[in-house]
Amino acid sequence: MFKKILIANRGEIAVRVIRACREMGIAAVAVYSDVDRAALHVRKADEAYPIGAPAAAESYLNIPKILDVAARSGANAIHPGYGFLSENAKFAKACVEAGVKFIGPTAEAMNAMGSKTQARQAMEQAGVPIVPGTSRGLESIEQAQQVAARIGYPVMLKAAAGGGGKGMRLVHSPQELKSALEGARSEAERSFGDGEVYIEKAILNPRHIEMQVLADEHGNTVYLGERECSLQRRYQKVVEEAPSPIVDPAMRSRMGEVAVRVAQAAGYTNAGTVEFLVDQERNFYFLEMNTRLQVEHPVTELITGLDLVHLQIRIAAGEQLPLTQEDVKIRGHAIECRVYAEDPDNNYFPSPGKITLLLQPSGPGIRRDSGMYEGWTVPMDYDPLLAKLIGYGTDRKQAISRLTRALNEYFVGGIKTNISLFRRILRHPDFLAAKLDTGFLDRMLKQNSDLKDDAQVDLGKDGSAVEVAVIAAGMFAVLGPAAAGAGERDSGNGAVPNGSRAVSKWKSAAQQEAVR
């Protein structure tokens, strides 16, 4: 087993991996940019090393600097988390050349699945169902027109090296195709340095369902059940749950077997996720494979009882999987909300700044994976993900109830967050009925665009303003009675002497009750 692991990441995922290392008796090494000197992952690690300026290219994406820290610290393995270098085949190869174990798949497996067109070609050969379209980049507008006419509109243009919704265009008619292709190519070139774009049939209002797989270095591969990831905004996942409300055991088995076939076709090892689009008839099609740990991995951990980060580390250390497919059991239901520093009232614009007050939920069935603390300044240089809040229950209804209660306990002061968005989602009739698809959130936001932020109007079951109560309690605790409106003179049984501090009416009432 490894003695020391370097975590080449930041934020909540770095904290998550550091905790796993500590549980396994492994020293954890953090790296940080200049702006992250006081970040939580730096505080939690056993050792921490600076790696440069805030710009990711000069710090978290700088391969030589990270490998230099690995050498200086004596780390014999690197966990990349997600994002940054996690799916960078050059980094995985550089780790091997430097004699450091990369906790993830090989560079060859990454290359096989990193390009969406190459992945489609490999899946065709493996007999995996894929969405009708091209498996190579479009060479001309004429070719695009011919393919679109053959498979039928609407069609989707996608960047071969894409992700996060960049380089994607939904095209409804031939008249839109040329400008859409030019736009997709231009955005793909800017975002990924690769302007290759392919075309496929657009499946309208699909569900986005993914399957978690694990593969060791001894030829063993298992699937750990699916995650429903249909709630998205601008092609970015916002809420995830496991298991999917529409997947029964038979469908899970079919999807899982296909996911295992995908992993084996790529020569895949470690943790990975195979993503599918599912149409309204519950037919599923291979979309892509994410060659890393997913943001939403906690929901799978909760319903299976498995620790994916522990298993990642053990697989990288050469151990065999400690379970077979028959050992994987799904129990209960889990739902995750991604808490971002962004302003719902300003088109979800990032909201960096100092966290002046932090009230975090807890209680039965609640898990928080967080990278923030009170007093920390959220930088503007990186993805605004602050934390993940997960609710677990014996069934979907209980998971929703617990998560709703936890969201009403959650308050982040000093910056804007999207917590109010989740309250709206979790009480929406279609969400409660599991009527989900990738267009759900856009429709909901459009329908409610004239409503105020729920943080201002959300009411508890008894009609009390939950947020107002939370804010008042926090201000009272931090700033004293005057901040909570309790600094008035006593106009009842006696005047407060001049120069003395007013007694809180809350405390006064409690004292009177005690006397009674």
Image: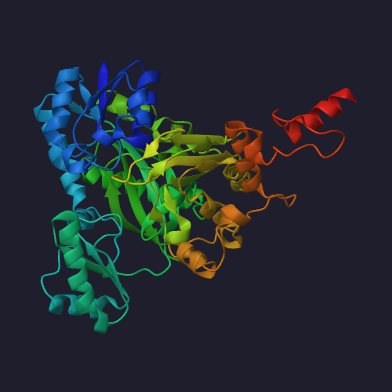
Work out which quarter of the rendered image holds the N terminus and state it. Answer: top left
Which residue is situated farthest in the front direction here? 498
Residue 186, given in percent of the width and then of the height, sits at 17, 66
Horizontal side of residue 395 vs 493, given as left or right: left
Number of numbered labels in the structure image: 0
- The residue that appears at 17% across and 66% down in the rendered structure is 185
Horizontal side of residue 381 vs 391, given as left or right: left
Q: Nearer the viewer, residue 308 or 32?
A: 32
Work out which quarter of the rendered image holds the C terminus and state it. Answer: top right
- The residue that appears at 77% across and 32% down in the rendered structure is 496
Horizontal side of residue 300 vs 424, given as left or right: left
- The residue that appears at 26% across and 18% down in the rendered structure is 4
Give the image's coloring scheme: rainbow
Dividing the picture into quarters, in which one does residue 349 lie?
bottom left
The answer, for residue 2, to whether it is visible in the render is no
Q: Nearer the viewer, residue 17 or 344?
A: 344
Which residue is situated farthest in the bottom direction here? 175
Horizontal side of residue 485 vs 154, given as left or right: right
Dividing the picture into quarters, in which one does residue 388 lie?
top left
Q: Nearer the viewer, residue 415 or 5?
A: 415
Residue 392, given in percent of the width and then of the height, sits at 56, 39
Residue 385, given in percent of the width and then of the height, sits at 39, 44
Residue 442, given in percent of the width and then of the height, sits at 45, 65
Q: Is residue 477 above or below residue 471?
A: above
The answer, for residue 445, to whether it is visible in the render is yes
Dividing the picture into quarters, in which one does residue 160 lie?
bottom left
